[in-house]
Image (spheres, rainbow, N blue to C red):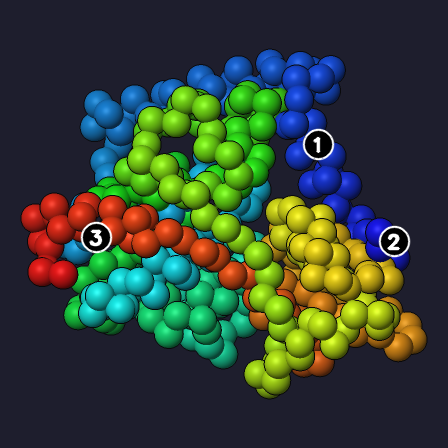
Amino acid sequence: MGKAYSHSPEAGLHGWLPRVWLSRGLSAWALRPVAALYAVVLRLRQLAYRWQWARSTQLPVRVIVVGNVVAGGAGKTPVTQAIVEHLKQCQYKVGIVSRGHGRQSQQVLSVHPDSLAHEVGDEPLLLARSTGVPVFVGAQRAQAAGALLAQHPETEIIVCDDGLQHLALARDVEVLVMDERGIGNGWLLPAGPLREPWPRKADLLLHSGACPALAQTPSFAMHRQLANYAVNAYGDRTPLASLQGLCVHALAGIARPEAFFDMLREQGLQLATTRAWPDHADFGAWKAPAGNGTIVCTEKDAVKLWPNHPEVLAVPLLLDIPASFNDALDRLLAQSPTAKPL
């Protein structure tokens, strides 16, 4: 096991809460009163939209929302990438909107491959570079979508990366993503990981662990694994096999950094050190460890590290999504009033 050479100071809480959420222990019970208040606020918000005190924006194009019901990453962004690639193969003109978590600006912005992560967010920047489709960010996703359509009126489908609970944006298809954690202890935040009560219906469910109990949605199993290579800022590939037996330092500023470290070890890498940062960390104070060694990170981290550390190697995450999921998505899109023939 790799030994952490110094966790970022703010990483403690981010590591503690996910452990609390795995069981209904004393710490989880202590947070139940706060979770009860959260439940009341959540219910009032849902009723506001149901009774039309608050209104959802209906866009003139179809909208697919990719999200989850638990806090922390479950693979939404890689699923968004896969869905966009499938839609492109179907000859759709696609755009992506996102809130851009962790960015400093609240403006609606167009994301370009050379954008700065602290302005547009790490995940939107990764999506802009990997998919080649228009990507817009905004605190209000409906405003981001409006700006996208104004600049790219040919767009036929907008995919929203995250935003399952963002009721201000109407959607045609909801894709729920879950990993091996499932619903954790089954309690609402902060006593548990749930952003909203479970069970929760959606149109499609993609899960990389066991199918969650009480799932009320057509479910499809996906497999996640790291690629057998890493890439630097210049696009040069390094086989992971060539790093076996060498001094490797791993870092990750994602929701579940240990999952990334474990997958590296499964590839045969012996990690000299690991360092976990909170999700969406900007790495502004990060310095490479002294001495020799190769530094590896996630693709999401790389878009923030590469401007100052182009030698850092990013290891892509690969998804194996069943064809039956794409078929089901195609059928849902074909039922839309504005559907084009597939």
Quadrant hosting residue 49? top left
Looking at the image, tell me whether mark 3 or mark 2 is earlier in sequence order: 2
* Corner quadrant of residue 266: bottom right
Q: Which residue is mark 3?
A: 330
Q: Position of residue 214 (x, y in %)?
A: 41, 22
Relative to 342, say whether 332 is above or below: above
Q: Check disc 2 and report the residue beneath it.
A: 3
Judge by depth and name the residue closer to the eye, 75 or 223. 223
Residue under the image location 84 percent in, 51 percent down: 1
> In the displayed structure, does residue 270 sit left or right of residue 325?
right
Query: As rendered, which of 57 and 248 lies closer to the eye?
Result: 248
Please state which of the two labelled residues, at mark 3 or mark 1, is closer to the viewer.
3
Q: Is residue 13 left or right of residue 122?
A: right
Query: For mark 1, what is the residue?
Result: 19
Sequence order check, earlier mark of 3 and 1: 1
Question: How many labels sit on residues?
Answer: 3
**Amino acid at dot 2:** Lys
Q: Residue at x 10, y 60 (%)?
A: 340
At a point 61% along the width and 15% down the height, the residue shown is 32
Query: Is disc 1 placed on a helix, strand or loop?
Result: helix
Give the amino acid type for the residue marked by disc 3 in the picture.
Answer: Asp
